[in-house]
Structures are given as structure tokens and as C-alpha cells.
Image (spheres, rainbow, N blue to C red):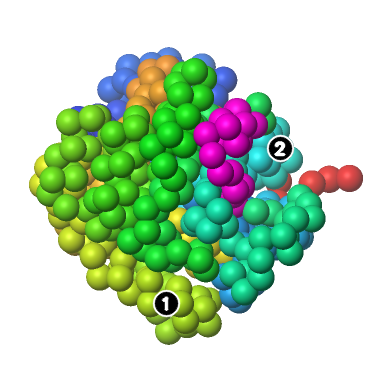
Amino acid sequence: MTNATVIDTLKGVSIKGYTVLTQNGFIENVVPNGGFDSTKYKVVDCTGKFLSPGLFAFHVHMIAVQGETGLRDTLRLPQNVMLMRVGAHSRAMIERGFTTIRDCGGMEHYIADAINDNIIIGPRAFFCGKAISQTGGHADLRDNNLPGQAFDSCECHLSNLGVVADGPDACIKAARENFRRGASFIKIMSGGGVASPADQIEHVQYSDAEIKAIVEVAENYNSFVTAHAYTPRSIKKCVANGVKGFEHGNLIDAECAQLLVKNDCYVCPTLVTYKALASDQFSAFLPPSSKAKNAIVLKKGMEALVITKKYGVKICFGSDLLGNLTAYQSNEFAIRAKVLNPVEILQSATITPASIMKAGDVIGQLAKGFYADILVLDSNPLEDITVLDKPEKHLLSVFKNGLVYHTKWAEIKSDVPSTIAC
């Protein structure tokens, strides 16, 4: 692709008049126009176009597929129904420009393998397996009108986001089971949440001993633990026991932000989900108890983003949208633009998450040796990051591993069939 303006995510600048050379799924080089032998490549003239690295969505739930009108039905969907829908769910994400995702609860290796094998179309995936929750915690979605023994039968037919484990020994087993099944990190529920029926936002979940046990397992696998957490109390408890990442963090304060910086931790805000849940369009999605909790975190989410920016906390791009709400995934860009500048936002969706997942040498930049994950845009996201919130208008083509997975531009043809030939 020649005559392009290339987005340098590391330096936070756009450079005009460059050519991106790709071969065998990787970027062979990025050179000034004319600095290559055009007879050896298929040349695409990108005059007036902008080339960006593919985006990294750092908090998604791939099994929370579209189709149901309510939260409970979305999160308690039969697994066979989910598997019939996950391909469309996955394909929609890559068509928004997300060439890599990190699933924070529920995704199994067979979905990631199917994507890698192009059986279903979608972003490459990092995943934690089942999020680990205490009884009555954020991933315990059992109806709280019934006793626990009412659910003693196997629920393996459901596409659950999490697993319940109490006590250090059970937590160790749950973490090891996730790694056995291909997880690249572990997620725990360390505080109350909007979706869970039996807790409150301010609740702190898991004991020091349980958190330490899970962290030790992760460290033994050269990995790390991230935690669902909103409050400073929950976050501080996790930091003290070795947790390195925090999902949401809506109630974070200055002291907590400084603690995260000191301990080289990151936070992944997911502001769009609370906005969507509070909208009239999805008024029937949450039960009344969850609506009240959503109002709390919605009010504080933007304040938390201001605080994390002020103290220099590492920030990643996530959405946490479930089911039908996932269509608004890209709206997180526009929401963050009220506080963060375009460079900060784009880095949160490229180089920062790639580094955290130890893939910073192959994901997140248009540079020699990186995966050929390339977005062709008609506008510069470093001048207006909200162009990424309108992929249907500004995103012309999406490359992953050098193949064209989505295109609306006549100059580039898709490498992915719309149907599979029998």
C-alpha cells in the first residue's frame, strides 16, 4: 500500500508519503514512497487514505452474543444456541476494526481456534476462560430466590461467563483449570457488579488468602491476574495481593490511582456499557436492582477517567457490552474523547494492551516484523478519534495477518468469502 499517511502509534504522529510492504501475514517494511521494487508486489494506491494498526479491544465477552432482549437470558443462554450465533458476533467486531480482542470471561479455546482457522471470522483472541467468583459474587448469576443446592446439577449446557470457587484450594483448582484449557491470563471478581443479583457495588469479594492463591498460580504460568473492581477498597486489597489489572474502576480516587502507578498496574474503563444500559433503547435489558447499581457507576465513570489520566495510570480500551448492546462497541472512542486526546485513546487501543499481553513486538504498530493488521481509513484518527466511532462511514478496509477480512473500497477485494462453499 503506497502513497499513504501512516499512523505511528508509538510516537503518536502521522507520516505522509509512505509505503507499507506486507508478506506472509507480516509487515515486511515501512518505507518512503519509491523505496521498493514495485514489480515484486501488488501495489494499491492509498493517496488520501490513512493506515492505522488494527485495534485491540481489551475487554469483551465473546459468548454474550446478540439476540436476547434481557440480561438474564443473554448470560444464561444454552451453549448450543450461543455457538450458532458467535460467528456473527465475532465477525461484527472485526468489521469495526478490532483485529485483536481480550475476552474477560466465558470464551473457550475452541472459539479462539475456530477464529484462527477461519472457520468463523473474527479477531485473534486472548482469553481468561471462566472468570472466577466467590459464592454470591459478580459471576454467580444464580437466582438469589433459590438456595445454592437448587443448582447442584451440572450447568455445562449453559454458556456461563464464570465459575464459582470458594477457599484457596478451590480457587487454585479453578485457575489451573483455566490455564489447562488455554487461558493466557486469569480474571477474578473482587467486588460487586451491575449484572450480578446477590451483591452490591461496594461489596469486597475474596479474602487475601484466596487472591494470593490465584495470583501464585498465574505467576507460576508466567501470567497475571486482572480483577473486576469498582471501589478503592476492592482495588487496594487486590494490589496488596499481587493483582496487576483492573476492569472498570469507576469509583477510583487519587490515592488509588497513585497506588496503581507505583505497582505498574493498568485499568480498563468500560464507560460505554453504562451509557447504553441507561438508555431508553435498552430500558428492558436490566432488572430494577441492576438499574440502580448502573446509575452509581455511570455517574462516576467519567470522573475516574479524569483521575487516571491525571496520575498517569496505564489505560486500555474496553467496552464490556453484552448481547444486543455490543453494536455500540465503537462508541467508547467518542466517550473517552471528552477527557483524553486522540493519541492517548488510540494508544489505549493498540500499543498499551499489546504490551500488557506480552505481544508488543507483533501487535499495535505498523512496523517491520509486526502482524499485518491494518485499517484503511478515509480520515485521520489522530486529528479526530471519533472517526473510529463511525466505522460504517470512515473504515474502508480491514486487514488481519495480511488478509482482507472486510472491505468497502473498490481498490481492495476481500480475501474472505461471505459464504462457505460446500
Per the rendered image, the range of residues in magenta is 161-179
Quarter of the image with the N terminus in it? top left
Q: State the residue in front, 375 or 161.
A: 161
Residue 276: x and y, percent?
41, 71
- At which x and y percent is residue 191? 39, 53
The alpha-carbon separation of the residues under discs 1 and 2 comes to: 34 Å
Q: Is residue 56 above or below residue 248?
A: above
Q: Is residue 41 shown above or below 233?
A: above
Residue 271 in view, yes or no: no
Q: Is residue 52 left or right of residue 222?
A: left
Q: In the image, is residue 127 part of the stretch drawn in magenta?
A: no
Answer left or right for 25 relative to 276.
Answer: right
Residue at 83% in and 45% down: 421
| Residue at point 51%, 24% (across, down) | 217
Circle 2: is it few (<14), some (14-19), or many (20+) Cα within 10 Å? Answer: few
Which residue: 24% across, 51% down? 232
Q: Amino acid at mark 1?
A: Lys
Of helix, strand and loop, which one carries label 1?
helix
Mark 1 / mark 2, whichever is N-terminal: 2
Front-most of residues 374 and 314 = 314
The residue drawn where x is 42% and y is 50% is 205
Q: Are marks 1 and 2 in contact (CB under 8 Å)?
A: no
| Residue, disc 2 | 110
Q: Secondary structure at mark 2?
A: helix
Q: Amino acid at mark 2?
A: Tyr
Task: Pinpoint residue 297: horizontal percent, then vertical percent.
Answer: 31, 66
Residue 291: numbered disc: 1
